[in-house]
Image (spheres, grey):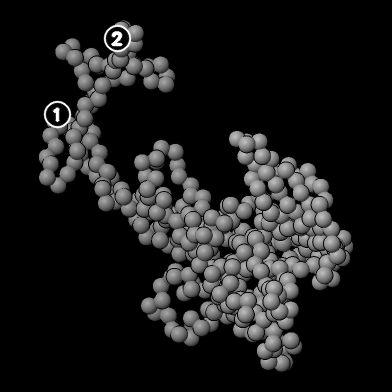
Amino acid sequence: AIGADENHDERLSYARGVKGEIYSPPGLDEYIPLLNMSGTPLIKIAIQTLAQRIALGGVHLTPTEGPDKGISDIFRRNRWASRETIVYMNAFTYGYGIVSVWPGANTKQTPQILIEDPQSVHLAWLPGDPFTLDYVVKLTTERRADPRTGDDGLDVGYPYTDAKIRKLHSPSGRHEWTERESIANPLGRIPFVPFIPERDSNGDIAVYIDPLMEIVDAINTLRYHMLLAAQFSAYRQRIATGVDPIVRDANGEPVFKTHVVDGVEELVLDENGMPIPLIQKPGRAGVDRFLVFPGEATKIFDLAESNLQNYTEAIRYLEASFSAASRVPSQFLGIGDFTQVSGDTMEANESGIRTFGAHIQHTFG
């Protein structure tokens, strides 16, 4: 059975273009703003591109016939063109999208096609046949528990089989189900249709974005490190040698930090129990400032700046890996350099997404 996804929040954040996991070494809290601007929404672009590519162009009853106008009109009246990408993006994000089909409210000639939340609909397959639905359970919450009023809340479950539709009640979050109603299924079939891009012979679902998330994490981490390196290149790190920054008394002895505890002045100790000396501030470097240090042995120099090209080359390599794994050409992702690329080459780059899109359309039926 498949249902509520324990990785739902993580997958949803990547699908929405949130930065994901970016490694930051300890001690860099002051650079959190750089980390926050390092994310790239590659997964969001990839699933949107695929969803647009496989959009319904018409319903063909056989491979050789043209679109069936009657069935195509049913999708049109259900505004499928403006809603289908939701189903496809759910399929790529969670492993499956799902719709329900019901007789029309006004006319049975136009059934209703409703988009369902994959987190609320649980699918179970026949034993020994992982490609045929055995039953489906849809969960809803009619009332949430309210400790102020003592209301336990109410969860409602609707198990569907080909033969029956049942209604179950439970106090919210307890899973203590009691049957309240059971009727014959007027359709004679389970009214839910899953859209599953990829399954193995056991019926286990492979989620499209899962292998892409770690690649995006690596890209975002390198982007963050590159921005860090750019900061240190823009504000060159200066080193002074031959300068004693410790404050000393008239006898040349270090002066230590103190604080008052219960009216008594005590030394401030570090984590090793050692007193902390007072340090002279050397001053701030700037284009309109002149720093003076005592002593003939004082030397000041800049640290060498990082070569940012090393980062950009590594990022391009990972972006190429993402393009290959997602089957979405780099020109759709907005990555790479196309100044010297011919139209024929870009057309050839689209062969992968054309083939994959056709496979998904065939898989979805």
Residue at (78, 43) in percent of width and height: 176
Q: Nearer the viewer, residue 59 or 288?
A: 59
The quarter of the rendered structure image containing the N terminus is bottom right
The quarter of the rendered structure image containing the C terminus is bottom right
Residue at (11, 40) in percent of width and height: 290
Query: Which of the 4 quarters of the picture holds residue 159?
Result: bottom right
Q: Is residue 297 above or below residue 163?
A: above
Helix, strand or loop at label 2? It is strand
Helix, strand or loop at label 1? It is loop
Pointer 2 residue: 265
Label 1 is placed on what type of residue? Answer: Gly
Q: Is residue 286 left or right of residue 231?
A: left
Does residue 323 appear anywhere in the picture?
A: no
Residue 346 x %, y %: 48, 81
Q: Is residue 338 above or below residue 201?
A: below
Residue 341 x %, y %: 43, 80
Residue 287 x %, y %: 14, 47
Residue at (70, 75) in percent of width and height: 104
Assess disc 1: are there few (<14), some (14-19) or many (≥20) residues with their C-alpha within 10 Å of its C-alpha: few
Label 2 is placed on what type of residue? Answer: Glu
Disc marking residue 46: none
Give the Cα distance between marks 1 and 2: 34 Å
Mark closest to the chain's N terminus, 1 or 2: 2
Q: Is residue 304 above or below residue 216?
A: above
Pointer 1 residue: 295
Q: Is residue 83 left or right of residue 140?
A: left
Residue at (13, 29) in percent of width and height: 294
Q: Nearer the viewer, residue 52 or 208?
A: 52
Count of all numbered marks drawn on residues in the image: 2
